[in-house]
Image: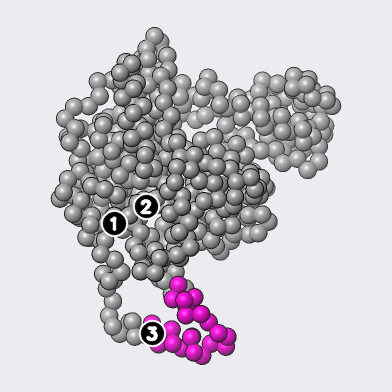
Amino acid sequence: MKRRWIALLMAGSLFVGAFGTYWLLEGKGAGEEQQSGLEEKEEGPEQIKGSLEHFDKFGKAYELILNQYVEDVEEETLIEGAIKGMLDTLGDQYSVYMDPEMVKQFDETLDSSFEGIGAEVSMVDGKVVIVAPFKDSPAEKAGLKPNDRILSVDGESIEGLDLYEATLKIRGEKGTTVKIEIERNGLSKPLVIEVKRDEIPQITVYGDIKKQSGKNIGYLEVTSFSKETAKEFHEHLTGMEKKGIDGLIIDVRGNPGGLLSSVEKILKEFVTKDKPIYQIEKRNGEKIRFISPLEKGKPYPIVVLIDNGSASASEILAGALQEAEGYKLIGTRTFGKGTVQQPFEMGDGSNIKLTIYKWLTPEGNWIHKEGIKPDIEVKQPDIFDTHPLQIEEALKKDMNSEQVQNAQQILEGLGFAPGRVDGYFDGATETAVKAFQNHQGLTVSGRIDKNTASALEKAILAEIKKEKNDLQLQTALRYITK
């Protein structure tokens, strides 16, 4: 396929299965033989196999409904419904039909930025689930987290909608707001989170050199794998190496994935020719190994940070560095997305994005729905598990609820010692609230109204962003310098 494709949802929306859930096999593989093995599927719909008898049956059904149904039916509606029905029978949420308008909106997102809330979503067990919000996106700032399950959008249920239909409800212009109702593990009641859409720049690599035990440790955070990611990564890494680094941390936490070609280019800077970068398994079981031409690896130690928001292309990177080069993975188990999709043009501007391969780790492991286990498992502090406060009426002494419990956890994380975190608003909690209000210059009432709730949320977000509280990063720094 010669066209550029990223499965990034249209302007004004989320990334749908985004970089992580849908890929394009773009550009050349590790060699001509390997690439030719991946091109045989690109000839299009004419390759569909089926007997004329079965197509005759389909035609009869089509004519019957078109001519005899009690109400008029558009021919295009029937055809598109039939296509969607065939894809539905596959039981694969990653194989989908996109009408011409959807394709047009996808193409618009190939610009250097797009408008939306900035979150990757996928379909898991029939529910639309947040894979990861993007770094510093409206979704992240509003409090959306990996594994949040979306129930409704602006008060309308999305039950029964496919991934694209659901995300179409979330898209919108910069400056507008959307209310997203979610289920979250650990909470008995849903949360309604309001997100203000904004422009989401496509900067995907952030670099820094960190000091640890007298050593210079390179740090590269990759937020997704888009068209320019490999170039950005190489420029950052080259600059760091010129300054001199004693180790490197690659951070793909919350990275939903992206272009296969992008992660492949990055891996060719680290993985030598001794083992494959990854493998592709075709429907007949044939496996194609992708080999890097690299003769010699890096002269410094490397670790990779992962979590349950690391999906797809991020998992290819983590799996390759772990199995091919023996570099350690630190964090929590990854998302578990082990298939490859490719778009096929249908001739009228529409596309079918179809799962055509499994991808495997260098050692041939398929991580689909399983994820990759870290070598060193590190859970973040409890402050990372706090939720947005939903304040309809002020929280006060003698109340008992999940919202009180969440507020107590925030107060505890901020060092204001409520004394308990079980959801009962007692005297010690009231004292902690007063101390926080006094510290913030708020009216000291001991009750958590909307102003105090907002201040608590801002304070805990600031605390989460402090490097000293990032236990996974701190563990990586200590490990790499020991």
Give percent across and percent down for residue 452.
76, 30
Marks 1 and 3 sit apart, C-alpha to C-alpha, by 30 Å
Question: Mark 2 sits on what residue?
Answer: 5
Task: Name the residue carrying label 3.
Answer: 59
How crowded pointer 3 is (Cα within 10 Å; few <14, some 14-19, many 20+) is rated as: few
Q: For marks 3 and 2, give the one nearer the viewer.
A: 2
Q: Quadrant of residue 112?
A: top left
Quadrant of residue 224 within the rendered picture: top left
Gap between marks 1 and 2, in whole Å?
A: 9 Å
| In the displayed structure image, the side of residue 460 where residue 396 appears, left or right | right
Does residue 209 appear in the picture of this structure? yes
> Which SS class for mark 1?
loop
User: Is residue 272 magenta-colored?
Assistant: no
Instruction: Indicate the secondary structure of the residue bearing disc 3.
Output: helix
Q: Amino acid at mark 3?
A: Gly
Measured as percent of width and height from the top left, residue 45 is found at 30, 69
Vertical side of 378 occupied by 368: above or below = below
Q: Which residues are magenta?
A: 57-80
Work out whether 326 lies above or below 319: above
Residue neighbourhood size for the residue with mark 1, other residues' Cα within 10 Å, grouped as few (<14), some (14–19), many (≥20): some
Q: Give the quadrant of the C terminus.
A: top left
Q: Which residue is mark 1?
A: 1
> Marks 3 and 2, how far apart in space?
33 Å
Q: Are marks 1 and 2 in contact (CB under 8 Å)?
A: yes
